[in-house]
Image (cartoon, helix red, strand yellow):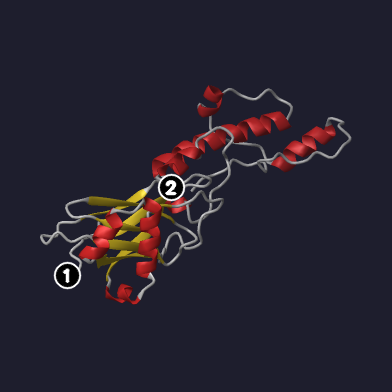
Amino acid sequence: MEMSTLKWEPAALNFSVALNKASMQQQLRTRNTSSSNVAYTFRVQTTNPKRYSVRPNVGVVWPSKDVTVTVQLPAMKEYPSDMNKCKDKFQVLTLPLKSEMAEKLKSMSADQQLKELTDLWASSDAKNAVVDKIHCSMTFDSSFRMSLLEPGTYKRPDAEVLPLITHATARATNVVRRISHQRCCARHAGHRPLSRAAILGTTPVCRPAGRLHAQRDRQGSGRRVDPPLCGGRPPTFR
């Protein structure tokens, strides 16, 4: 039986991860260039089957035909703990089909082919398969960086994310946080919040919260004054 001459590409898959959003689809591709008109069956396995969606994971590569396997990550509610050092791997097992089996599969429906191929991969013939290993890696979706600039988004990202934010994005985020800080202090002091233009034209200096509270108490408020949400000092983003 002829050994597999199929070459699967690419040699590594990179997944762009964003919370609550399915990642971009990655594809494994191959072409049957066998000169002896041999069909091949393949099977895709992964070290982390609960994490990835693979379609199809079993199939046939007919002579002079191309096959594409789609691999996708599902939507995630939190970033994987191994995101920076992902050790997940895929392996594609390829096995040449005997001419009798190939002719038999051609006359079957898709469901019948799947059952027949599943039985083939469960047999002892699978030990002769050629294995191609595909490595995986993960990166943060670029849209995550821009989400920091959206209105109402002022939470400091996790420490693992900070090094991935560019200096330009950090400076722009500082502007947003400065505006939020100044308006927070103005509302707490009972003043009308400054406009965006006025805030950007001044240095974000805030009187200490303790002094502000003492002045309000001397005015006869007669009640406890809670500190502003910002803590009374301008935030920094580094």
Q: Quadrant of residue 193?
A: top right
Give neighbour class at mark 1: few <14, some 14-19, many 20+ (Cα, 10 Å).
few
Give neighbour class at mark 2: few <14, some 14-19, many 20+ (Cα, 10 Å).
some
Considering only order in the chain, which callout, 1 or 2, is on the residue closer to the N terminus? 1
Closest to the observer: 215 or 88? 88
Rendering coords of residue 129 (x, y %): 28, 71
Q: Quadrant of residue 106?
A: bottom left
Secondary structure beneath dot 1 equals: loop
The residue at 39%/71% (across/down) is 122
Closest to the observer: 108 or 27? 108
Closest to the observer: 133 or 40? 40
* Circle nearer the viewer, 2 or 1: 1
Rendering coords of residue 187 (x, y %): 70, 29
Amino acid carrying label 2: it is Ser
Residue that numbered label 2 is attached to: 23
The residue at 67%/43% (across/down) is 231
The residue at 45%/38% (across/down) is 146
Q: How many marks?
A: 2
Label 2, label 1: how many angstroms apart (C-alpha)? Answer: 38 Å
Secondary structure beneath dot 2 equals: loop
Amino acid carrying label 1: it is Glu
Question: On screen, 228 above or below 45?
Answer: above
The residue at 11%/62% (across/down) is 36
Rendering coords of residue 54 (x, y %): 40, 55
Residue farthest along the left direction in this orientation:
35
Question: On screen, 121 above or below 12?
Answer: below
Residue that numbered label 1 is attached to: 2
Closest to the observer: 75 or 195? 75
Specify whether 147 is left or right of 225. Answer: left
Q: Quadrant of residue 62?
A: bottom left
